[in-house]
Amino acid sequence: MKKIAIVTGASRGIGREIAKTLAKEGIHVIANYNKSEQKAEELKKELKRENIDIDIFKADVSKREQAHELVEYTLKKYGKIDILINNAGIAEFKEFTQITDIEWNKMINTNLNSVFIMSQEVLKNMIHNKNGCIINISSIWGLVGSSCEVHYSTAKAGINGMTKALAKELGPSNIRINAIAPGIIDTEMNNDIKEEDVDIIKNDIPLGKIGKTEDIAKCVKWLIEDNFTTGQIISINGGWVII
Ligand code: NAP
């Protein structure tokens, strides 16, 4: 039977690329989206043209009930979950003193609590099967912090801590948990960055370029195939951050 993977936030950007890569590898993908229904449908159609079937499922994964429905849908249809990619996320530039409670909670709910909720929901099945692979999409800012992105950096640092602790707890159940911490990747998330600032960033990056969604998807594929890597935060950033 095919491996079953849930990819959160698969309508656009990095999640979409991960969903495509895994589906082309013969893994059955449940591509989650929240607001971008049309883009999710386009992804399904695009893969269908290559005779590849995926499921798309609308859920705000920061909400327990909706995350539960996504997992229940998958389990009812396919009976198991082998892989969870916690990719859904938002970004916001704001001075720390200007961040409201609502903005802080939205960031932590979307970028951190969703990882807690989705992981808990799938782990019931993974622990039962003594098999599983969870990959969390973090960020370099969770490693080194970013000015005017304190709430984002805090959420991503939380993901890194969760990844390490959970890997220790669930290694004995044959479940591997890793995170990927990308540097700057060419997606809509960075649409607000001015072209001249992109050039400045490129100059700062030893490899002299912005990353592509494929760079992250390739690492996800490798982490799924591997069976001795767990609790690691793998940073793919062109050498921008080396720790
Ligand atoms: P993106 O192009 O803005 O896409 C974000 C995706 O997340 C969309 O598919 C969106 O779905 C989904 N999403 C947001 N909130 C959601 C929610 N509550 N429930 C379900 N889905 C939700 O961003 P991206 O650049 O691909 O980022 C993907 C991940 O990589 C994020 O976790 C981000 O922090 C991380 N990352 C990105 C970069 C970068 O430079 N791009 C760098 C480091 C880390 P809908 O549109 O359907 O709502």
Image: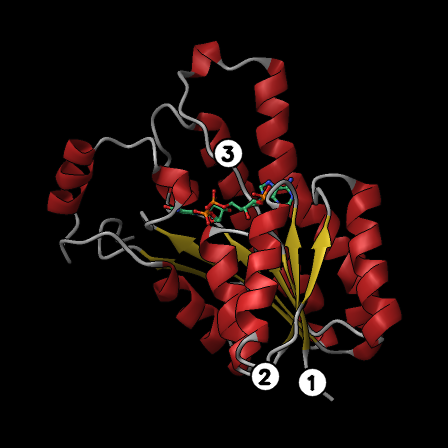
Q: Secondary structure at mark 3?
A: helix
> Is ligand 1 closer than 8 angstroms to the Cβ of mark 1?
no
The answer to whether residue 147 is above or below residue 52 is: above
Q: Residue at x 60, y 78 (%)?
A: 52
Q: Amino acid at mark 1?
A: Lys
Give the alpha-carbon distance from disc 3 to disc 1, as whole Å. Answer: 36 Å
Q: Tell me how far mark 3 sits from mark 2, CA to CA.
A: 35 Å
Disc 1 is placed on an element classified as loop
95 horizontally vs 175: left or right: left
Residue under label 1 = 2
Mark yes or no: residue 195 visible.
yes
Which x, y percent locates residue 23?
A: 57, 75
Question: Which residue lies most toward the right here?
Answer: 76
Residue labelled 3 has its Cβ within 8 Å of some atom of ligand 1: no
Q: Dot 2: within a 10 Å radius of its alpha carbon, few (fewer than 14), some, or many (20 or more) residues?
A: few
Front in this rendered view, residue 3 or 111: 3
Q: Is residue 136 positioned above or below 78 on the image?
A: above
Q: Element under label 2?
A: loop
Residue in the image at 60% along x and 55% along y: 40
Tag 1 near tag 2, CB within 8 Å: yes
The tag on residue 154 is 3
- Name the colouring of the figure: secondary structure
Is 56 above or below relative to 200? below
Q: Position of residue 131 (x, y in %)?
A: 72, 78
Please state which of residues 97 and 201 is positioned toward the viewer in this rendering: 201
Residue type at tag 3? Thr
Look at discs 3 and 1 and give the one toward the viewer.
Answer: 1
Residue bearing the label numbered 2: 26
- Tell me residue 82's x, y (percent): 70, 74
Type of amino acid at the residue the image marks with label 2: Gly
- The answer to whether residue 228 shows anywhere in this view is no
